[in-house]
Amino acid sequence: MALLVVKDVHTYYGKIHALKGLSLTVDEGEIVTLIGANGAGKTTTLRTISGVLKPRDGSVEFDNEDLASFRAHEIVYKGVSMVPEGRGIFSRLTVFENLDLGAYHRDDDDGIKQDFEKVYSLFPRLYERRKQVAGTLSGGEQQMLATGRALMARPRLMLMDEPSMGLAPILVESIFDTIHEINQEGTTILLVEQNAHMALQVAHRGYVLQTGEIVLHDSAESLRENEMVKKAYLGME
Amino acid sequence: MTSVSEPAPKSNRSFNLTSAQRSRIFLNIIGIVILVLLVWRIYIVAVDRAYPIQYWAFQVINGLVLGGVYSLIALGYTLVYGILFMINFAHGEVMMMGGFAGFFTLQLMNSLGWSDGTPLQSAATVFFAILAGMIVSVLTGITLERLAYRPLRGAPRLVPLISAIGASFFLQYTALLLFGAIPHNYNKPSIISGGISVGDTGIFISYTGAFIFVAGILLMMGLFFIVQRTKLGRAMRALAEDKETAALMGIDVDKVIVLTFALGSALAGAGGVMLGFHNTVMRFNTGFIPGLKAFTAAVLGGIGNIRGAMFGSILLGVLEALGPSALGLPTEYKDVIAFSILVLVLVFRPTGLLGEVLSEKKA
Ligand SMILES: Nc1ncnc2c1ncn2[C@@H]1O[C@H](COP(=O)(O)OP(=O)(O)OP(=O)(O)O)[C@@H](O)[C@H]1O
Ligand SMILES: [Mg+2]
């Protein structure tokens, strides 16, 4: 069953036509990856889904509901949370305060407590650093924080924008392990990546985005074997 | 060919200062000269006049009270700046509106006989005057946000600033039209009239001053609690760092901005009534100079910084009270002193005394 349906979306930045009729779907329980070069429109796609940007044309439906009339914070209530590009942690707030903000709209105290425990067991490092100001965390720890914070919303769909960016190879491995684990526990994930190699290993399906348009979409397996993808995104001849 | 590291270019290096470094040094020299002149002047005056200690104590107390009022107003500038990076230049007028609400409440309570009634009635009068001031200022502040600032969000930073200056004049002349140009005398309730002498030191503390100082501190502690300890405060701090990400946390950005204006205006309203008690009059332009002073105080402490606003206000209040006597100038020069401080801070330490360097991302 399709949880997210993006239909023929056109998004602009002023006169810049960033998304030119983009369509994609994400089914409940899937990991779907969106790969593409710099400036292809990956971040714009996620910002359009999350309601920060409104498409000029086309529609975004989540759980069979059109999101057009909802503002960004209301879309969070519906069950969509985001790990933003560059992590977007609040550097002057503590680790605990950052995580707690992830659950800002919730008032089920018991559930929030459970999720804190879940996040801390997923990232024991965050528990050790919970009273520390988030700006002093290392890059890898900040990525854990951004991921943990998105989980604190108890999302049905998690949007992740280049979680592996700027991390050492060993950390990249562990981030993708975590993505797999989160998905196993029932969260649907739309993953934007430039690291197509890793993304196509963890994802079920993938879309290839070029200058605002989907040029290819298929199962992750087939994409890994696709000549064009191999050449352009996997660095293979 | 291998003589690249000859001593000749090396010895030149210390003269190759960038222009920024040169102007920095130039500024420091000017700063030191100004400081020396000030100290010299204070020394001369101190020897020459030799005021008694009671006089200085009186001035310090006066400065603390004034500083308390300034900080209630300065906090509004700093809260709004911390979140929207805009100077709400109409904030002094927001305070003035609260001051008038306090005036009319006092009139009403006086006609009921509460103002000088039992201690409880008199205390209630003070309470209701401040409450009315806070309510009217909050209404003024959030209306301003809705009509004059929100439509301009995302415009270049100069645009809302101009709108704020326009709003400031609009409110002043609205008050002129409604209340006329005559000064309205504040009816001081009996409970805060008079004062006590401290032993036989000759130091006198007025009840009004003591009340303003204590109530001001309580209100600020309340604000501090809200910002540091509550969910709203956490949302405000998140918003100050990054609005888009805050929205992605499920924070209703518009609502938090309105509440920020409401908080700042509430403090200004209380400050307006207290200023009325302190100065005993209220006029249509009463908000202007104290507004600028509070702005100065916020800049002095480091705009956007709550502790800085409190510290800057107290410091400014005391400097303004002591300054004229210490420098041997007539008291009318206190405004000159306050605004000279503003200029000096902007030139020598634009981030303020407790200020941090703002990151570009936030602008
Ligand atoms: N705020 C903005 N204003 C104007 N143009 C923008 C803005 N943000 C993005 N763009 C433009 O929209 C296009 C898509 O940008 P987007 O950030 O979505 O790319 P991306 O695929 O996420 O790239 P990257 O891999 O570098 O993050 C680019 O041409 C970019 O220059
Ligand atoms: Mg991007």
Image: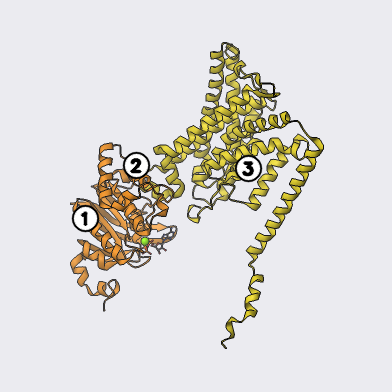
The label on residue A181 is 1
Q: CA distance from mark 3 to mark 1?
A: 54 Å
Instruction: Say if B28 sits above or below B312 in the image.
Output: below
Q: Nearer the viewer, residue B203 or B292?
A: B203
Measure how far apart labels 1 and 2 are at the Cα level: 24 Å
**Do badges 3 and 2 share one subunit?**
no
Write down the colour of chain A: orange
Q: Quadrant of ligand 2?
A: bottom left
Give the quarter of the image for residue B340.
top right
Side of B27 relative to B225 (left or right): right
Q: Are marks 3 and 1 on the same chain?
A: no
Do marks 1 and 2 both belong to one polypeptide chain? yes
Q: Position of residue B200 (x, y in %)?
A: 69, 21
Q: Which residue is mark 3?
A: B296
Q: Mark 2 highlights which residue?
A: A104
What is the C-alpha distance between the residues marked 3 and 2? 36 Å
Measured from the top left, where is residue A85 in percent x and y?
37, 58
Residue B139 visible? The answer is no
Camera-side mark, 1 or 2: 1
The residue under label 1 is which amino acid type?
A: Glu
Name the quadrant of the N terminus of chain B. bottom right
Q: Residues within 10 Å of mark 2 (few under 14, many from 20)?
A: many
Query: From what the image shows, is residue A52 above or below residue A33?
Result: above
Q: State the image coordinates of residue A225 (x, y, percent, origin top left).
A: 20, 72
- For the question of whether residue B283 can be seen, the reply is yes
In the figure, the yellow chain has which letter? B
